Amino acid sequence: MSSEAGNLKATGRRKTSIATVRLVAGTGQIKVNGRPIQEYFKTEQLRVVVAQPLALTGSEAKYDVTATVRGGGIAGQAGAMRHSLARALSQTGDAVRQALKLAGLLTRDPRMKERKKYGRAGARKRFQFSKR
């Protein structure tokens, strides 16, 4: 994470997705992997998840967002982008950081896929039981 005058950078993670975000003072355009947010995140629900930190701090029209996301699925990528946006915005001041922290946006979601265990059909699934 680094910040210069009006240029904020941060990285966020969710499941196996990693998002790197750069905020520059601007009009509120959001680009994900070089494409507009409407083109990359098709559903309104995912776009709301991504824009949550901006809406909470009231800075939707203050910054232009350039994001690079990789790994995982589309929902994990949206969560990773939300995390990185929150981390970047938290660099702007203590009041903003407190608001984001209270909303739980600075906490990395620790839930991951459970590994498959040996001698089993899956992570938790057992083979069929037969008494005889």
Image (spheres, rainbow, N blue to C red):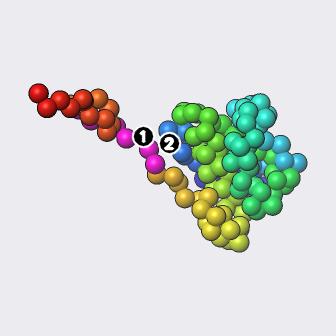
Residue 106 percent across, percent down from the top left? 59, 59
Residue 115 on the magenta segment? yes
Task: Point out which mark residue 68 bears.
Answer: none
Residue 54 percent across, percent down from the top left? 75, 55
Residue on which disc 1 sits: 113
Residue 34 seen in the current view: yes
| Amino acid of disc 1 | Lys
Q: Residue at x 57, y 33 (%)?
A: 73
| Amino acid of disc 2 | Lys
Residue 22 seen in the current view: no
Residue 42 on the magenta segment? no
Predominant SS of the magenta segment: loop
Q: Earlier in the sequence, mark 1 or mark 2?
A: 2
Residue 107 percent across, percent down from the top left? 55, 58
Residue 36 percent across, percent down from the top left? 79, 34
Q: Quadrant of residue 103?
A: bottom right
Q: Residue at x 61, y 39 (%)?
A: 75
Residue on which disc 2 sits: 15
Q: Residue at x 88, y 48 (%)?
A: 27
Q: Which residues are magenta?
A: 111-118
Residue 33 relative to residue 114: left or right: right
- Evaluate if marks 1 and 2 touch, with contact meaning CB atoms under 8 Å apart: yes
